[in-house]
Amino acid sequence: MLMESVLAGLCLVGLSSMALAQGGPQPFGKGFDNWNFSWEKEPSGLTNCRAFRRVGGRDDIMAMRTDGQSYLSVRAEGRNGKFPKSIVVPLREPANGMQWDLLVEADGKRMLMIMPPAAIETIAAKGGFTVLLGGSEDRDDVNLGKSAPAAWKRVKECVVASGG
């Protein structure tokens, strides 16, 4: 759990300091279906590859670093703090279906969920996810759309092209 907290903290720092990274985000290929793609060399030497889109007031990110760490990020909508024992389930999944128990962290602007790449692959294939924030009755339904699998594939291509 401590490792998850440390990694989540590093991701939040990475997300909030995008402008400070060497050269800032660079495009990675042409966007499609409201998805755009970028890569960014971080001060640690890792490359962060992202698929991002803004639809209907949402601001969704699927990303992976060249060390294999992957994450989902959405607007925090004022949420702030750590939410241990949170649950993420793919959209349209039955109650007894697949879920991931994890720590979710929010800094008021972004909410971050570090997850295995295979979990994000499943979520993209289902077209989105629901996050139930631990210790609260708060939930967020995130529709990533029908092009999410192709967007996640582009993220993985970026990671490979960046030496990951």
Image (tube, rainbow, N blue to C red):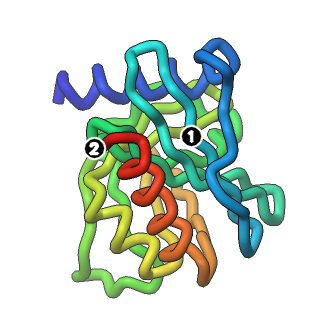
The tally of labels here is 2
SS assignment at label 1: strand
Q: Is residue 135 visible in the rendered structure shown here?
A: no
Residue 78's disc number: none
Query: In the rendered image, which quarter contains the N terminus?
Result: top left
Q: Which amino acid does label 1 sit on?
A: Trp
Q: Which amino acid does label 2 sit on?
A: Gly
Which x, y percent locates residue 137?
48, 52
Query: How many C-alpha atoms fall within 10 Å of the one at disc 1: few (<14), some, or many (≥20)?
Result: many
Q: Which residue lies furthest to the right in this view?
A: 56
- Between residue 75 and residue 21, name the one nearer to us: 21
Question: Which residue has dot 1 on it?
Answer: 39
Seen in the picture, residue 125 relative to 17 is either above or below; the reply is below
Counting residues from the N terminus, which is met first, the one under dot 1 or under dot 2? 1
Q: Is residue 48 visible in the rendered structure shown here?
A: yes
Seen in the picture, residue 140 relative to 161 is either above or below; the reply is below
Question: Which residue has dot 2 on it?
Answer: 68
Using residue 48 as the reference point, say whether residue 20 is left or right of it. right
Q: Residue at x 71, y 62 (%)?
A: 30
Q: Residue at x 79, y 64 (%)?
A: 55
Q: Which residue is drawn at 65% across and 58% down?
A: 29
- Between residue 46 and residue 15, name the one nearer to us: 46
Seen in the picture, residue 76 relative to 93 is either above or below; the reply is above
Seen in the picture, residue 127 relative to 57 is either above or below; the reply is below
